[in-house]
Image (spheres, rainbow, N blue to C red):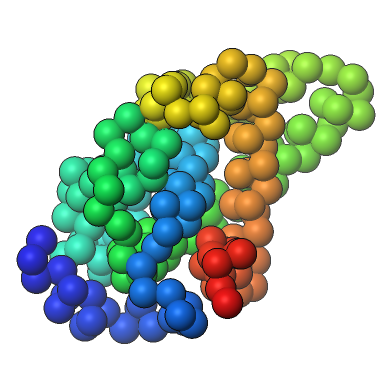
Amino acid sequence: MSDEPTLMSQLPILSSLADIPSVTQCSVRTAQRLDLMLLALEALAIGGAERMLAAAKRLQLENIIKNRVVVWRLRCTNPWRRSYHRQPLTLEQAKVLVIIAGDLARQRSTLIRQLLLAEQQMLQKGLPLGHHFQLSEYLERFRSHYKARMNPRRAKVEMYLSSEEKLNALALELLNKLLFCTGIQGKSRFWFSLFDGEIA
């Protein structure tokens, strides 16, 4: 991947996301936020990882996102991960992941809205969220992905693992953020939201 910076500089699609003032690389907090959003996207349907690769090809990013291993390495910049590595996520790499996430969120916008509406209906009726089949499937897949990939020795990770209710709440919070990505300028708003509290 030594030629990756050169390849990225030749991708006009990356210019659709503005550079972040005074930020030269992503913090671990930014990497963690981005990875969790991708985790939620994966949980929306079986085959989430393959959908990311298909989106990369459709967006002509396949020279950067060549296979699942590349995606995995980029996402392991999240310090919550079992396979966390300390090499920081570059702004260009983060842009690539945001563009893919935004594309997938738009594709799944109808489902995202349906799931959030189902949550409201279950709460209004005083019913457990598991009573809605699609919502239950999403939450179950999210919990499964989270448990399999996150490091239980991390205090924050363990907090969510200790409570199915808290893990469901995280999954729903991320679903609301995904909906935020689907609107006009949603991709740019998502991009800037990753750096909330970090821009001077």
Q: Can residue 42 be seen in this view?
A: no
Q: Quadrant of residue 166?
A: top right
Q: In which quarter of the image is the N terminus?
A: bottom left
Task: Identify the residue at horizontal 59%, vertical 52% (top origin).
Answer: 178
Going by the image, does 78 lie left or right of 177?
left
x then y, percent, for residue 70? 20, 50
Q: Which residue lies furthest to the left in this view?
A: 2
Task: Please state which of residues 27 and 119 is positioned toward the viewer in this rendering.
Answer: 27
Residue 44 x, y percent position in the rendering? 52, 37
Could you tell me residue 111's position as x and y percent? 61, 43
Q: Which residue is pictured at 42% across the width and 36% down the height?
A: 80
Q: Is residue 176 visible?
A: yes
Judged left or right of residue 176, residue 53 is left
142 vs 134, left or right, is: left
Q: Which residue is drawn at 33% across and 48% down?
A: 77
User: Height in image: 162 above or below 170?
Assistant: above
- Vertical relation: 147 (above or below) 112: above
Query: Residue 119's x, y, as percent?
Result: 77, 33
The quadrant in which residue 172 appears is top right
Picture quarter with the C terminus: bottom right
Q: How many labels does the image show?
A: 0
Q: Residue at x 42, y 59 (%)?
A: 27
Q: Is residue 12 above or below residue 195?
A: below
**Residue 151, relative to residue 116: is it above or below?**
above
- Along the viewing direction, whichever of 149 and 85 lies nearer the viewer: 85
Left/right of residue 164 with respect to residue 75 in the rendered view: right
